[in-house]
Image (cartoon, grey):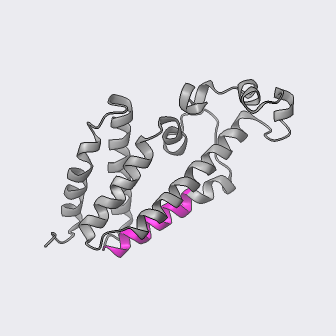
Amino acid sequence: MATEQGLAQITLREVAGRVGMQAPSLYSHFESKHAIHDAMFGQAWTEYLETLRVAESAAPTSPRAMLRHLARTFFEFSASNLARYQLMNQRTIPGFEPSAESYAPAVAALELLREQLAGIGITREEDVDLSTALMGGLVDAQLANDPGGDRWARLVERTTEMFADNVGLPPEA
């Protein structure tokens, strides 16, 4: 429903109808609309964490190739679903704060990313933040200005190379 209509348009009545129950019965599973958002938030970050782990198993060996691989993994996962990306990264739902339980996979994903970046020589916190901001910015631009296209997707490698130069990763042989 979020993908079809957007996060803000979800109503408990519609959710209940989609799963074949009456709206009051839905409250036995979720106490509020924010509780549904919380479950979706946790599920989305769990899916990304698993995607990141799978990407790690297929990772290239050179630092620059690994950086491009991580960037492409994040970009493709994020740009593939606007509602999921908004929920995960943009705080578009007024008053929604993820629970500690749902936030845990997001923390684990960031920690795994930090470990993967450290493995290729990127260890400064501000460099991890910059990497995240660069890819997030490309995803934002892609989703806002060319959904389903590749205008900003084509810039992932170039952006990654500029970042690699900035942090001093060695050139590829």
Q: Which residues are magenta?
A: 106-120
Left or right of residue 42: residue 3: left
Image quadrant for the C terminus?
Answer: bottom left
Q: Residue furthest left?
A: 173
Relative to 163, is 111 above or below? below
Image height of 78 relative to 59, above or below: above
| Viewer-closest of 8 and 59 | 59
Asked if the magenta segment contains residue 167, the reply would be no
Left/right of residue 54 with respect to residue 152 in the rendered view: right
Q: Main secondary structure of the magenta part?
A: helix
Place of residue 80 in the rendered image (x, y in percent of width and height, measured from the top left): 44, 41
> Residue 65, position in %: x, y?
26, 65
On-image quarter of the N terminus? top right
For image coordinates 75% across by 26% down, the residue present is 17
Instruction: Identify the image quadrant of residue 124.
Output: bottom left
Q: Residue at x 71, y 34 (%)?
A: 33
Q: x, y (%) of residue 38?
A: 67, 44
Q: Nearer the viewer, residue 47 or 140?
A: 47
| Residue 144, x across and y down, in percent | 37, 30
Write the residue at 56% across / 25% down.
5
**Residue 112 colored magenta?**
yes
| 156 relative to 173 in the view: left or right | right
Q: How many discs mark residues in the rendered view?
A: 0
Residue in the foreground of this view, choosing between 162 and 71: 71
Q: Is residue 38 left or right of residue 139?
A: right
Query: Could you tell me which residue is drawn at 53 percent across and 60 percent down?
Result: 50
